[in-house]
Amino acid sequence: MDIDFLGGPQPQRGVGVVAPFDFALDRELWRWVPDGISLHLTRTPFVPVEVSLDLARLVSEHQTLREAVRALIAVEPQVVAYACTSGSFVGGLAGERAMCEAMSRAGATEPDSPSGGLPSVTTSGALLEALGALGARRVAVVTPYTESVTRSLEEYLAQAGIVITGREFLGLTRHIWKVPYRDVVDMARRAVVGAADCLFISCTNLPTYDVIPQLEAELRMPVLSANQVTLWSALRRLGAEAVGPYQRLLMDTQQSPPPVLPSSVLPPVLPPVAPLTLAPETNPPLLPPPLPPFPEQEGLT
């Protein structure tokens, strides 16, 4: 059979993804990726440490990042994304910038490349980029972490001029990917207690794809998640758009140009603002209709 008429395969465009060794949501990442773009995942080496600030520091060491990026270079990704929230906020704004620079240099095909190397993003840097794109400065936060790790996220956001209006956390140190959607929804409802511009669900190991539309419909505000902003930011650097039903970030930023600054440069830090109480009717109009409750995920306990 002659298959010359197929004319393929088409040229591949790739996103290199560096994830912690315990990352379990490869399939969820793919759900935001449009046709014609591939994800190339690699993981940091195993360390016998539970989810904590210590683990966040270990999986974000520059030597670890450089080795992970070099493992991806053979397949020629056009951008590399570090998919871990805690690992990219544990060092504050300066630490996140340094991580991007380390990955970018490791991905440079020429040692003295004037472009600075491979475009690189992290989950926490992508979060600030997404908040800037939405004009959000007051954020409710949901995490599966312990209180100390959650507090580190709040400190990172505060450095960027973001006001935390409410928070909820689960206190988990392992098996975060097994958390069912219903627990995420319950936390979100409790966290949104003030005049928030949006809700952020932290941790790339926490399933969120299917729960975002339901929460946006119920809470009447944009809902961001760690995996969502990571892929959204990385794909923007390819001139591509993340895909996802009824997700305000994706709808509001369609066709918008990617950042003109190199990916290793943080978005402008917003000045701190005082909390402000808004009347409920001032919330943005609701786009998607309410969705029925989601069933529990199969196989999870």
Image (spheres, helix red, strand yellow):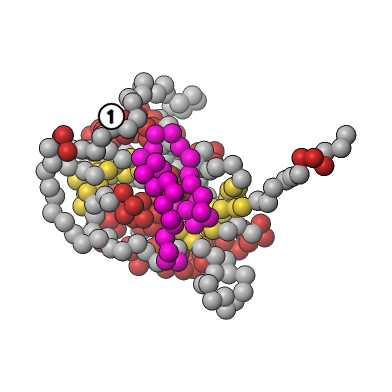
**Identity of the residue drawn at 36% across and 24% down:** 291
Badge 1 marks a residue whose secondary structure is helix
Residue 45, position as x, y percentages in the image: 55, 55
Q: Which residue is mark 1?
A: 218
Q: Outermost residue toward the right?
A: 1
Of residue 147 and residue 130, the one placed in the foreground of this image is 130
**Identity of the residue drawn at 32% across and 25% down:** 290
195 is higher (above) or lower (below) than 185: below
- Our reading of the magenta stretch's main secondary structure is loop
Q: Quadrant of residue 145?
A: top left
Q: Quadrant of residue 246?
A: top left
**Identity of the residue drawn at 26% across and 49% down:** 136
The question of residue 249 being in magenta is answered with: yes
Q: What is the number of callouts on the image?
A: 1
Q: Amino acid at mark 1?
A: Glu
**Few, some or many residues within 10 Å of mark 1 (<14, 14–19, 20+):** some
Q: Which residues are magenta?
A: 233-262
> Looking at the figure, which quarter contains the C terminus?
top left
Of residue 171 and residue 80, the one placed in the foreground of this image is 80
Q: Note whether residue 185 is visible.
A: no
Residue 293, position as x, y percentages in the image: 36, 22
The question of residue 143 being in magenta is answered with: no
277 is higher (above) or lower (below) than 113: above
Of residue 246 and residue 127, the one placed in the foreground of this image is 246
Q: Note whether residue 37 is visible.
A: yes
> Looking at the figure, which quarter contains the N terminus?
top right
Image-based side of 74 in relation to 298, left or right: right
**Identity of the residue drawn at 35% across and 30% down:** 288
Residue 148, position as x, y percentages in the image: 28, 51
Residue 201, position as x, y percentages in the image: 34, 42
